[in-house]
Image: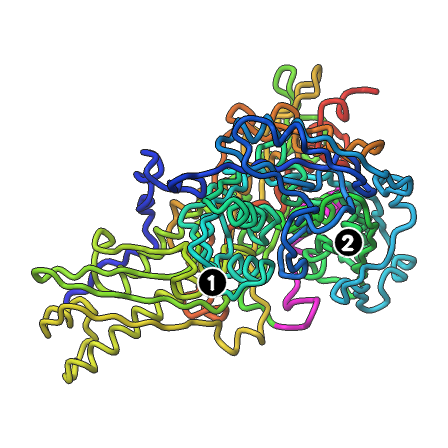
């Protein structure tokens, strides 16, 4: 039997690309419904206190208004149902500025918006509100979560006293917001006691479970439909109050309701990346061997829930060091709950760690790449487990050749081109590689000797190309072209699956589909009753046996032995910057990310993923900052006019390389995640390049011109 060329590993176009560029792909608010009503949220204007009066009289008389919903008439919900951030209209208490305190439901969005402005609210303000991080951070608390207890190895930080060379500095990262192209939005439709929610959900079954529990329903009474998502970056992983409030509104007006957050509402409705103050202490010998590493983080959380970004994760495993301390302290604030944001902890933590490593290299007069390789660990320092594979050194070495690292001038501020200072920077990163249990169904149909397949799985496509890599997986597994495969995902009625979060999506979904393909082939061979010297494809058996329809379903999970190893994706990031010495403006002229992430299912979509992460890292380094007004607890940055994300002119030449890596320990297909690792280490590489260009070490992001110009 002639062996067909494998589709996995080819950079084919997205199979849903035409749907998206022609506008035929339906996102959450694109679903039509008869007699649709529109809901608009209105929010608190204080950070802490209690609502004493809500006057809705004028709003109720406004044209088109169907219902005004507040804590005074909202149904009783289960506040421990699994939604994030509270704000479910369950009482008069206000715990952060911008908390949902009501909804207007009207015939049109414009009518609902106009009426919402007419609602008058009186408060009893709490004078003890907690909104000034600078003051609160002076007396932080221990986290409640046991997983964030102090982690001490060897002599911990006390070993710093014996270090021959020391680097100790604080590094700060600001509050950031997710801001996907598609703001959070929902269409809610009741069918008797059953509910359909059209919603952008990174975890389909998680959204189903949380919505059902919060609404006091059974999971089977709630259906989540989310085939297309316009980005999320973590904010659509855990669901927020708007999901359930849309359902509440639909129930109370007895018709379908559309609830879409505005860009301004996104700032205080769906979480954020919290501000972090990180102190890094490095101790080393004079020849660059690390002896001590301490990574101490102070951050903030909400007053009623706790979430803390794990900034010390990279520091636990990146370098061989006998003595270390990873610690967290936190201050509760009257601010919306922080949440998972692309590369949570690793992206912010790597800025501090990799900046400090660059500072140590400069202090020792050692090349930054050589210093990192010198301290490469042979096994995971945090737990003693062997690596399933580790590509950090390869990433550094291959990246240095491709980038032209040998052209870097080690003395800062000595590389000029006209009025521009030029600098090179490098930084490494990592993210765990995991597979989560997922199920997939395969349905085969034969028409005139042509076999077609439908793959069903309650996965989500965050815009990353899930549809395409699953079609490629099925094509190889079944022996049929991609064009004969239909992918159905994004629906909780389909076989349950993991989510597109934590870089588990590709490995979990692809292995589930691959296992289902193997199972259906085995079952077809068994049905034929024949023995084969060469294993046939499912398509071949369907034709040979005249089978018209056949289907199966299977569940896939990580191999048992995977727990015995430490499995991660690794990278090395190389940045070239130009800085105008007169204006202080920084431009990333070149950026190269070199990544070791196991089997790359589709190099084209994978490259897009890495570059997307790099661009966010550029924003993190140079432009993005949500500014909190410490007087009132609200954000001074409220739109893209003042929250600056990188545009085309802000980004120079980007390139991505993948290390050829075979690692079958984390999962049978050898797939590792790339969605998160693309941002890890990026900000540090840019900051290190800025130092190389100017001789100024910027330890507080973003790196804006005022920080580079003479004071």
Residue 627, position as x, y percentages in the image: 74, 32
* Percent position of residue 104, x then y: 59, 36
| 221 with respect to 138 (left or right) | left
Residue 694 image-quadrant placement: top right
Q: Where 638 sits versus 668, above or below?
A: above
Task: State the SS at label 1.
Answer: helix
Location of the N terminus by quadrant is: bottom left
Q: Nearer the viewer, residue 287 or 466?
A: 466
**Residue matched to label 2:** 304
- Secondary-structure class at tag 2: loop
Residue drawn at (15%, 70%) of the image? 542
Foreground residue, 632 or 544?
A: 632
Most foreground residue, 137 or 648: 137
Residue pointed to by mark 1: 221
Q: Residue at x 16, y 84 (%)?
A: 531
Q: Residues within 10 Å of mark 1 (few under 14, many from 20)?
A: some
Q: Are marks 2 and 1 in contact (CB under 8 Å)?
A: no
Q: Position of residue 119 (x, y in %)?
A: 68, 31
User: Is 592 on the left-hand or right-hand side of 331?
Assistant: left
Q: Which residues are magenta?
A: 356-385
> At 62% from the left edge and 60% from the top edge, which residue is drawn?
82
> Is 660 positioned to the left or the right of 565 in the image?
left
Instruction: Find out whether residue 52 is within the magenta segment.
Output: no
Please say if 422 is above or below 279.
above
x%, y% of residue 499?
50, 58
Which comes before the other along the chain, label 2 or label 1? 1
């Amino acid at each position: 039997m002639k062996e067909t060329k494998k589709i996995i590993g080819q950079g084919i176009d997205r199979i849903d690309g035409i749907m998206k560029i022609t506008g035929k792909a339906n996102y959450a608010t694109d679903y039509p419904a008869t007699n649709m009503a529109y809901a608009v949220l209105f929010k608190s204007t204080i950070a802490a206190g209690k609502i004493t009066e809500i006057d809705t009289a004028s709003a109720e008389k406004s044209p088109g208004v169907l219902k005004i919903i507040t804590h005074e008439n909202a149904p009783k919900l289960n506040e421990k149902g699994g939604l994030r951030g509270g704000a479910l209209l369950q009482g008069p208490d206000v715990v952060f500025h911008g908390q949902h305190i009501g909804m207007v439901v009207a015939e049109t969005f414009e009518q609902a918006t106009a009426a919402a402005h007419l609602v008058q609210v009186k408060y009893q303000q709490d004078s003890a509100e907690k909104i000034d991080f600078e003051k609160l951070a002076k007396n932080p608390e221990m986290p409640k979560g046991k997983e964030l207890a102090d982690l001490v190895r060897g002599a911990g930080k006390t070993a710093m006293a014996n270090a021959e060379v020391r680097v100790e500095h604080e590094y700060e990262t600001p509050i950031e917001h997710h801001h996907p192209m598609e703001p959070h939005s929902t269409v809610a439709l009741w069918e008797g006691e059953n509910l359909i929610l059209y919603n952008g959900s990174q975890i389909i079954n998680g959204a189903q479970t949380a919505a059902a529990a919060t609404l006091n329903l059974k999971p089977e009474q709630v259906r989540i439909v989310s085939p297309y998502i316009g980005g999320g970056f973590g904010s659509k992983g855990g669901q927020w109050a708007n999901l359930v409030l849309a359902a509440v509104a639909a129930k109370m007006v007895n018709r379908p309701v559309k609830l879409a957050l505005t860009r301004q509402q996104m700032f205080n409705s769906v979480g954020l990346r919290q501000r972090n103050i990180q102190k890094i202490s490095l101790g080393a010998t004079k020849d660059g061997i690390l002896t001590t590493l301490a990574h101490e983080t102070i951050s903030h959380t909400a007053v009623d829930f706790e979430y803390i970004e794990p900034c010390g994760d990279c520091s636990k495993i990146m370098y061989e060091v006998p003595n270390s301390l990873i610690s967290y302290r936190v201050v509760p604030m009257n601010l919306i709950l922080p949440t998972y944001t692309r590369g949570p902890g690793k992206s912010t933590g790597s800025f501090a760690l990799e900046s400090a490593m660059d500072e140590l290299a400069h202090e020792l007069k050692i090349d930054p790449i050589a210093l990192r390789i010198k301290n490469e660990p042979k096994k995971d320092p945090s737990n003693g487990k062997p690596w399933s594979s580790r590509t950090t050194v390869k990433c550094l070495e291959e990246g240095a050749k491709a980038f032209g690292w040998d052209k870097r001038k080690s003395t800062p501020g000595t590389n000029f081109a006209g009025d521009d200072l030029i600098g090179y920077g490098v930084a490494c990163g990592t993210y765990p590689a995991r597979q989560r249990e997922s199920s997939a169904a395969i349905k085969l149909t034969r028409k005139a000797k042509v076999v077609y397949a439908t793959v069903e799985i309650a996965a989500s496509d965050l815009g990353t190309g899930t549809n395409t890599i699953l079609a490629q997986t099925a094509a190889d597994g079944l022996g049929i072209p991609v064009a004969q495969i239909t992918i159905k995902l994004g629906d909780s009625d389909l076989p349950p699956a993991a989510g597109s979060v934590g870089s588990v999506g590709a490995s979990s979904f692809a292995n589930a589909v691959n296992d289902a393909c193997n199972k259906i082939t085995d079952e077809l061979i068994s049905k034929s009753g024949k023995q084969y010297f060469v294993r046939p494809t499912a398509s071949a058996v369907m034709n040979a046996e005249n089978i018209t329809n056949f289907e199966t379903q299977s569940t896939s999970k990580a191999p048992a032995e995977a727990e015995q190893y430490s499995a991660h994706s690794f990278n090395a990031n190389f940045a070239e910057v130009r800085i105008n010495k007169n204006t202080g403006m920084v431009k990333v002229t070149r950026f190269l990310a070199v990544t070791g992430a196991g089997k790359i299912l589709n190099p084209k979509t994978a490259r897009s993923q890495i570059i997307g992460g790099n661009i966010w890292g550029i924003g993190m380094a140079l432009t993005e900052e949500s500014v909190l007004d410490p007087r009132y607890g609200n954000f001074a940055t409220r739109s893209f006019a003042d929250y600056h994300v990188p545009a085309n002119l802000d980004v120079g030449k980007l390139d991505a390389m993948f290390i050829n890596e075979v690692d079958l320990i984390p999962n049978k297909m050898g797939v590792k995640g790339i969605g998160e690792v693309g941002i890890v280490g990026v900000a540090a590489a840019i900051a290190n390049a800025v130092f190389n260009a100017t001789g100024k070490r910027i330890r507080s992001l973003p790196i804006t011109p005022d920080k580079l110009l003479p004071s």
